[in-house]
Amino acid sequence: MESIKKLADMILESQYAIAFTGAGASTESGIPDFRGPNGLWKQYRAEEIASRWALENNTHDFFEFYRMRLAAMENIKPNRVHYGLAELENMGLLKAVITQNIDGLHKKAGSKRVYEIHGNIREAYCDRCGKKYPAEKLLEEDIPTCDVCGGIVRPNVVLFGEGLPQDQWIGAVREAEAADLVLSIGSSLTVYPAAMIPITVKEAGGKLVIINLEPTGYDSMADLVIHEKAGDVIEALLEEIKNRG
Ligand code: NAD
């Protein structure tokens, strides 16, 4: 495929390539995306459930929803996209992965430099004092509470109505400023400020590649757009790079 050859050229010529991933990177693992045809938001309204408002005012349903999401992710494994990006990092061709996903699959696949800018659902913390807990804490009680201060223990995910974790976000912005190539993989690029990461690379003179099943609002600004399954693209890219020796 011509576009895979071009993608291989771009990554081999780059000095500092990064990947920016969204829910579409994990659909092959069996986790539905939010806005695709089978997306989660077709079943639930985000503002009502995965929000700061729900944590405070619809607390029971909030925890029911997160327990359901945790259960759904229990036996989930990384797929070709996660493993492929980890391999590219090992080969020295990818410097970092910035992900909007909360499933922790990039780290599980072996990627080392990962920024989880929307948090990680396998972790929890006290909303009042910040004490960290494993996600199992969320299964203990209907509304789990902190051993130290009695505050509510909530999942370590960014809710609608909250800011991003500063350490992860600042690190991600630094990576974007350093990058001369960004691969945006499986993201509708509609969630802000996350979507600013690939745009920052492009606006600073770097190249933007969009790999997504459906068109995005940024396709016209991209240097290369591939509307294929991310797993097929990453697999073909690795094969092309290996064939070139
Ligand atoms: P999104 O749901 O808005 O968009 C996902 C995009 O991926 C869609 O445009 C879809 O066409 C595309 N896609 C689906 N399967 C694909 C595949 N196999 N190959 C290529 N593209 C594919 O997701 P988003 O942009 O990440 O934004 C949604 C927010 O939802 C994020 O903030 C993220 O935190 C959260 N989220 C996370 C998970 C997860 O952790 N796995 C799952 C759902 C949503």
Image: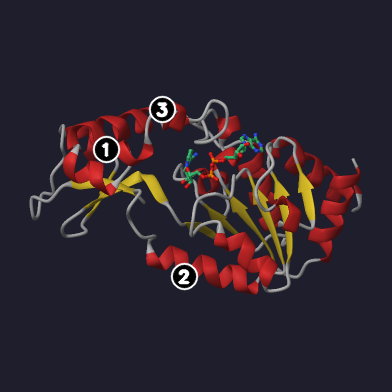
Residue at the spot 82% in from the left edge and 52% down from the top edge: 7
When the figure is inspected, residue 219 is found, relative to residue 93, above or below; the finding is above
When the figure is inspected, residue 207 is found, relative to residue 26, above or below; the finding is below
User: Which residue matches tag 1?
Assistant: 136
Judging depth in this view, the residue of 236 and 41 nearest the camera is 41
**Label 1 CB, ligand 1: below 8 Å?**
no
14 sits left or right of 45 in the view: right
Alpha carbons under labels 1 and 3: distance apart: 14 Å
Residue at the spot 18% in from the left edge and 45% down from the top edge: 56
User: Which residue matches tag 3?
Assistant: 72
**What x and y, as percent, mark residue 201?**
66, 67
Q: Tell me the colour scheme of the image.
A: secondary structure
Judging depth in this view, the residue of 138 and 35 nearest the camera is 35
> Sequence order check: which comes first, mark 1 or mark 3?
3
35 sits left or right of 41 in the view: right
> Sequence order check: which comes first, mark 1 or mark 2?
1
Judging depth in this view, the residue of 192 and 180 nearest the camera is 192
Q: Residues within 10 Å of mark 1 (few under 14, many from 20)?
A: few
Judging depth in this view, the residue of 240 and 129 nearest the camera is 129
Give the quarter of the image for residue 1: top right
Element on which disc 2 rests: helix
Nearer mark to the viewer, of 1 and 3: 3
Give the quarter of the image for residue 168: bottom left
Alpha carbons under labels 1 and 2: distance apart: 29 Å
**What x and y, as percent, mark residue 3?**
86, 46
> Sequence order check: which comes first, mark 3 or mark 2?
3
User: Which residue matches tag 2?
Assistant: 170
Residue type at mark 3 is: Ala
Residue type at mark 1 is: Glu
